[in-house]
């Protein structure tokens, strides 16, 4: 990091600087699925909510809820993750990618689109 820039960064920002995204899981602007989904979040499109529910001692259910705004985009998907094998971030990335595929349609791949193109296709 340039001198003292790390002081103003969150741990997540530092991790993103040091560990780049998997190229297969980013769009043409270099944003991952979670970042794209958060860019699309708007009161006229949808609201976004992440929820975590303990399933048992070694697993947890990660829920992604897209709550409709003015548009009729609504989605509720979940992923069960083993807390000893899968990170919460990996489960969220998988859910965000699934959500983008579902709201944009099967014929459009979010990885080949800019956020502006995604917004135009909602």
Image (cartoon, rainbow, N blue to C red):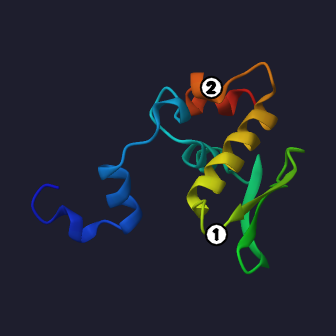
59 or 22: which is nearer to us?
Answer: 59
Residue that appears at 49% across and 26% down? 28
Side (left or right) of 26 relative to 49: left
SS at badge 1? loop
Residue reaching furthest to the left: 3
Side (left or right) of 93 relative to 26: right
SS at badge 2? helix
Rendered view: 30 above or below 99: above
Residue that appears at 60% across and 61% down? 85
1 or 122: which is nearer to us?
Answer: 1
The first of marks 2 and 1 along the sequence is 1
As drawn, the label of residue 37 is: none
Please rate how many residues cluster around mark 2, counting C-alpha atoms within 10 Å: few if below 14, some from 14 to 19, many from 20. Answer: few
Rendered view: 29 above or below 68: above
The x and y percentages for residue 66 are 80, 54
Disc number lying in front (2 or 1)? 1
Please rate how many residues cluster around mark 1, counting C-alpha atoms within 10 Å: few if below 14, some from 14 to 19, many from 20. Answer: some
Residue reaching furthest to the bottom: 57
The x and y percentages for residue 2 are 12, 55
The x and y percentages for residue 67 are 83, 57
Residue 44 in sight here:
no
Which image quarter is the C terminus in? top right
Residue where numbered disc 2 is placed: 117
Which image quarter is the N terminus in? bottom left
Side (left or right) of 48 relative to 9: right
112 or 15: which is nearer to us?
Answer: 15
Residue 37 in sight here:
yes
**Gap in Å between the C-alphas at discs 2 and 1?**
35 Å
Residue that appears at 41% across and 62% down? 12
5 or 41: which is nearer to us?
Answer: 5
The x and y percentages for residue 61 are 77, 67
Residue where numbered disc 1 is placed: 83
């Amino acid at each position: 990091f340039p001198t003292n820039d790390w002081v103003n960064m969150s741990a997540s920002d530092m991790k993103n600087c040091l560990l780049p995204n998997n190229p297969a899981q980013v769009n043409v602007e270099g944003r991952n699925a979670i970042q794209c989904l958060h860019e699309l979040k708007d009161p006229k499109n949808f609201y976004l909510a992440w929820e975590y529910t303990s399933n048992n001692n070694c697993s947890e259910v990660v829920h992604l809820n897209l709550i409709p705004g003015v548009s009729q985009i609504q989605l509720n998907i979940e992923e069960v993750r083993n807390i000893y094998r899968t990170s919460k971030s990996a489960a969220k990335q998988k859910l965000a990618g699934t959500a983008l595929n579902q709201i944009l349609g099967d014929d459009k791949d979010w990885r080949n689109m800019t956020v502006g193109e995604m917004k135009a296709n909602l």
